[in-house]
């Protein structure tokens, strides 16, 4: 099979298209013939060697795919061979074939194609977890979403606005802010207007950027306010991790004293969805809820760019370089 191998940790050029032996599914796994790859920021982090539990190079990155089941490992009865599925292997998905834990595979709903199927899982589940499980968003609350026009952001804006929250979308360009507004954001701001954005008070901040944004958002939380931190995009350069800049951004986040949470009734919470494996069963249920919203026309994965397999490193460059909107999807086959 063909696969994009990360030959070292580094910029998109470390990805090299190679012929590798076809993998075989182990016990509890299924083998998926990949038809579309949904790119996640985590794939850039894995390539750069800064994602949790990332293998040593050479390795095949690739968190999320859609495709068809071609074989079942020992103990796996479903989904049947031939079933179109969405799958989250975490690593290994930048390839024609990937083995995935059966718990991380889900049949595509009727009517959903491979491109959409590769674009909804990680972003939808992350947005859902941040907004509802951790952020406990209620109708009428003012919810700030940073990187609002990205993969997770576009799902979060739709989910929060659809649930009756007043969404404040933050994004870097006019085009991105327009998209956030189209998806349901009541107000949109650039990062240079961030203080003005949060000044009126905020119930929930859903932040994947971090750094200098943290303190103004944290201070603007209303009583019972919740700050949900689930990424640190501020550390990223267009091609590499900007270590010095990352250190400065980290310092700008300051220190939160536990006692400072009590009287103002504030919550600070963080998560990485890939590190809570005991959630697997529950995630299937939550994904079913997202599919229902999709089927009802109330949630759509925004796919900003579709590229062929041969251009996968360019897809990485677009995402890391902040040039993508919604999801970047890479397709294989016809
Ligand atoms: N903890 C978890 O379980 C989990 C799961 C999924 C994703 N995430 C995090 O959620 C975020 C969104 O993931 P995604 O895959 O949907 O990516 P994405 O939002 O499509 O792309 C990242 C976005 O971050 C913003 N950004 C701000 N500063 C940046 C910088 N210095 N370099 C690059 N981008 C910067 C950019 O939007 P603007 O140009 O508008 O600023 C960019 O488009 C990422 O930070 C990711 O690590 C966390």
Image (cartoon, rainbow, N blue to C red):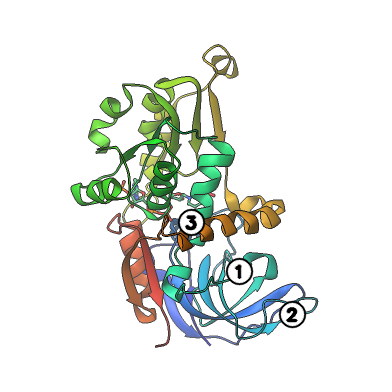
What is the x, y in percent for residue 102? 69, 70
170 is higher (above) or lower (below) than 42: above
Tell me how far mark 2 sits from mark 3, CA to CA.
32 Å
Q: Residue furthest right?
A: 75
Where does the C terminus fall, quadrant-wise?
bottom left
| Residue 50 seen anywhere in this rendered image of the structure | no
Query: Residue visible at 56% across and 55% down?
Result: 289
- The location of residue 101, given as percent across then percent down, is 68, 69
Q: Earlier in the sequence, mark 3 or mark 1?
A: 1
* SS at mark 1 in the image: strand
Question: Vertically, is 150 above or below 328?
Answer: above
Please tell me whether mark 2 or mark 3 is closer to you in this view.
Answer: 3
The verdict on label 3 being within 8 Å of ligand 1 is: no
Residues at circles 2 and 3 in contact by the CB criterion of under 8 Å: no
Q: Is mark 1 within 8 Å of ligand 1?
A: no
Q: Please name the residue shown 75% across and 78% down the image.
A: 77
Query: Can you tell me whether the CB of the residue at mark 2 lies under 8 Å from the nearest atom of ligand 1?
Result: no
Q: CA distance from mark 1 to mark 2?
A: 16 Å
Query: What residue does disc 3 label?
Result: 293
Q: Nearer the viewer, mark 3 or mark 1?
A: 3
Which numbered marker is on residue 106? 1
Q: Relative to the observer, which residue lies in front, 320 or 49?
A: 320
**Callout 3–callout 1 Cβ contact below 8 Å:** no
Tell me where residue 50 appears, x and y as whole percent. 51, 53
Front residue of 44/146: it is 146
Residue 131 position, x and y percent, is: 50, 41
Which of the marked residues, 1 or 2, is nearer the chain's N terminus?
Answer: 2
- Residue beneath disc 2: 73
Which structural element holds mark 3?
helix
């Amino acid at each position: 099979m063909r696969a994009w191998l990360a030959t070292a940790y580094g910029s998109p050029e470390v990805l090299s298209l190679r012929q590798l032996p076809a993998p075989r599914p182990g016990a509890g796994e299924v083998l998926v013939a990949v038809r579309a790859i949904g790119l996640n920021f985590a794939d850039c982090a894995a390539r750069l060697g800064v994602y949790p539990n990332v293998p040593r190079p050479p390795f095949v990155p690739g968190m999320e795919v859609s495709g068809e089941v071609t074989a079942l490992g020992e103990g796996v009865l479903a989904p049947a061979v031939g079933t179109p599925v969405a799958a989250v292997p975490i690593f290994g998905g930048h390839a024609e074939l990937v083995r995935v834990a059966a718990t991380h595979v889900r049949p595509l709903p009727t009517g959903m194609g491979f491109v959409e199927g590769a674009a909804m899982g990680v972003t939808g589940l992350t947005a859902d977890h941040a907004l509802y499980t951790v952020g406990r968003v209620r109708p009428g609350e003012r919810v700030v979403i940073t990187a609002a026009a990205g993969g997770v952001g576009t799902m979060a804006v739709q989910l929060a606005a659809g649930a009756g929250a007043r969404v404040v979308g933050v994004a870097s360009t006019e085009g991105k802010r327009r998209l956030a507004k189209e998806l349901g954001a009541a107000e949109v701001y650039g990062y240079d207007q961030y203080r003005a954005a949060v000044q009126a008070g905020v119930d929930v901040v859903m932040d994947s950027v971090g750094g200098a944004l943290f303190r103004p958002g944290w201070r603007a939380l209303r009583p019972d306010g919740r700050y949900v931190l689930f990424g640190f995009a501020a550390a990223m350069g267009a091609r590499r991790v900007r270590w010095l800049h990352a250190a400065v951004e980290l310092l700008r986040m300051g220190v939160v004293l536990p006692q400072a949470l009590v009287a103002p009734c504030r919550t600070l919470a963080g998560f990485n969805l890939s590190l809570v494996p005991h959630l697997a069963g529950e995630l299937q249920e939550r994904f079913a809820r997202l599919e229902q919203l999709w089927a009802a026309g109330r949630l759509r994965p925004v796919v900003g760019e579709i590229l062929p397999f041969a251009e996968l490193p360019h897809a990485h460059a677009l995402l890391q370089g902040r040039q993508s909107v919604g999801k970047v999807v890479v397709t294989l086959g016809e």
